[in-house]
Amino acid sequence: MSDKPLVDRSAEAAGVRRLLMLGGSLLFVAALLALFGHAYGGFALIAIFSLLAMVGIAAIFAFALGFVSFASPSADSGIAHRFLDTLDTGTLVVDRKGRILYANRAYGEATGAATPDEVRSLERILAREREGSEVVYRLAGRAGKGEAAHEEFRMERDLAGRPAREPRWYRASVRPVEVASGTAHAWQIADITAERAEQETFFQNLQNAIDYLDHAPAGFFAADAKGRITYVNATLATWLGFDLATIKPYERSVESLLGKDVAAYLVGDADHRPRVIDSALAGFDGRPLPVRLHVDHSLGLEGGVRAIVTERGAEAPDENAVQAAELRFARVFNSSPIAIAALDEEGRVVRANAAFEKLFGRVASGSVAVADLVKEEGRDALRQAMASARRHRAVAASPVDVQVGGDSARALRVYVSGTGTPTDGSRESVILYGVDITEQRTLEEQFAKAQRMQAIGNLAGGIAHDFNNVLTIITASVDFLLLNQRAGDPSFQDLLLIKQSANRAASLVRQLLAYSRRQTMRPKMLNLTDVVADMHLLLKRISGDLVKLERHHARDLWPVMADIGQFEQVLTNLVQNARDAMPDGGTITISTRNVGEPEAKSFGYVEMQEGEFVLVEVSDNGTGMPPEVAERIFEPFFTTKEIGKGTGLGLSMVYGIIKQSGGFIYVDSTPGKGTSFRIFLPRHVPAEALATKTEAGPSGIASLPADSGDLSGTASILLVEDEDHVRAGNVRALKMRGYEVHEASSGVEALEVMEELGGRIDLVVSDVVMPEMDGPTLLREMRGRRPDLKFIFVSGYAEEAFAKNLPEGEKFGFLAKPFSLRELAVAVKQMLDE
């Protein structure tokens, strides 16, 4: 075949450029002659101009008619042309207007074109061929969109129009290419008749092979390593009474189709199984079908099994009774959830089931002792138990708890029993049984921790309640003394110092109440991204100059319900602790993101309930904590700081705030690498119709202002308080403001006073925790007689602790202990004015 193309107009532009260069040279020569006064210079200049004008007009008409085009040569055009010219595949390049720019010799031979004038595009050649024209149309449309594509089509004759003894198959392809005139389409056409014939022959042979296998006189099935049926021939399907069309690959298991015995046979290590097994398969109608299976496990690294099934008469003797017994034992042995292994005299594994291998990993027979696979603290106890079992040939007296090493240690309770002297030549000396108790241990530890934290919380709450009464008395007494002292008196500063100390003590009490989850909280719907952003400058000052503070927030963060003031205390405390853990500087990272229910489960926190959460993570790369410190980090008064640098109540308060908000907090720390605190707050889904409460919180608690102008009044007030000194101070403070005050030491006495006064009481100020009758009970009793009676509760506990015991919609004021005389007067004045 000649290596020259039939059509190649890529050189036309170069010829035009050479012509222009020739004309320019002639003009230059004529101009020189005229310039130096030559006799024929002017005549030569006029003649050259006339000749060039005629040539230019002819070139313009030739270009307009398409006889001349321009192209820019590339550096590797010679190699590209050589490749295309000698290509066996017919290649054609046309521009957007359908003009042929290039056609190699192979294209001419395929289409029957011997000269450039006979070369036609594929669109014109296939215009009258229905299948071919549709294919070319679709390919041209794809190329017009800038895409490359190819398709195959069938013709009754060849592209040259010659009749063929058999239909011809062609593969046409097109792709857009960039040329000097714009984008062109490069077509290729190849005769693939021989290739299609080879494919059809292959598929026909394959179909014949499948047909032979389907109708073989023996059954056949194949399954993968997971026991899923991949193929069943028609013979076996007929024996079992199944419709072969309903048996799809990977949809049925061996157990569902062939029975439990065969399924158990396919599970586990195939090297220790017989190759022939007599069994009975369950047919579709439930009737047993006695068969003999010839099994092959050699399917390469992917595992799996294939088997030939032959019929066996029901009356035929079972020639493999021992194998059947071994099969039943193997089914129990391998499917047992308890780890079982037979050990030799040295404690090395002779054989083991799947549960054992899952816990210990695959252990080569006779290579590693089981005692060497457990952690050191339980190693000696396990060896002693195995030695005792070998001596007494019985189950050891008590189980041994060990831990299996690895990245995720598992707790295991091990029982061992001796087998006596083996008589069958085996090396088995001890049978080991292991039960995975990791989850049980985790639950026990978490339950014990929760009980301990609850007990400490109850103790802290009780101490805080009693201490609040003491602080109330101290605060009230100091306020009375300050009323009678001038600022210049020597004792005035001492009284102020006493009051400041009482306020500090009250702050510690609030931290204890936070830990015991009994503090006052005002939750509202928050976007934590906005909260962290608003606190950035404050947290930056807290972290200091040596520490870099970074924030990472996910988009579309879910809202949560939390007290913004309390949550700001949480972040402040965590950032302070992170700063203290990095004395030489480092990075503190605060990140927020949504955690869906599947991801929440993946964390593995057993205590955390199911649901959707917003995760706030505060991480540092500081000194970190050992596990024994991280275990106690949330306990009150536990601190690793030096004396005088911490009270040990900061993280306790954080723990209580998160718990009272319905969330969860966990710490993950590695010594030398840093610490991460993860806070999970439940996602809040606002109701479609939420009633707006402006004067009361979610429990009907009235919002009391921080101050008021005139704090005096003449109303009748009933003060109920079981602590005598607290009650006396409060009565004195209210009387100083002009109120008529009646007092009672219990709820029962308060009802009696109310009865004596004929119900002429404007306001009741009552403690919550009292003997005989508590505050909520007193409220229900008095509201039963006077529904409009105004009420203020005074307590060291959070109002939620008792508000939940009141009927829905009850309105009342709340004043947290300890409080000053002015705060008491403000609360009374505001409630009376409502």
Image (spheres, rainbow, N blue to C red):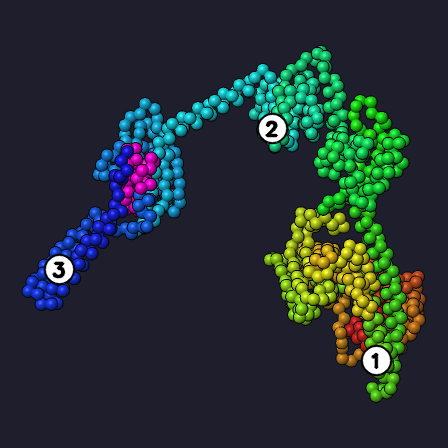
For residue 299, the mark is 2
Residue at image mark 3: 49
- On the image, the x and y values in percent for residue 170 come to 36, 32
Viewer-nearest of labels 1 and 3? 3
- Look at the image and say whether residue 401 sits in the magenta stretch: no
Q: Quadrant of residue 314?
A: top right
**Outermost residue toward the bottom?**
488
Mark earlier in primary sequence (1, 3):
3
> Which amino acid type corresponds to the residue marked 3 in the rendered image?
Phe
Start-end of magenta stretch: 82-111
Which element carries disc 3, helix, strand or loop?
helix
> Which amino acid type corresponds to the residue marked 1 in the rendered image?
Leu
Q: Residue at x 74, y 17 (%)?
A: 321
Q: Nearer the viewer, residue 515 or 397?
A: 397
How crowded pointer 1 is (Cα within 10 Å; few <14, some 14-19, many 20+) is rated as: some
- On the image, the x and y values in percent for residue 829 come to 80, 75
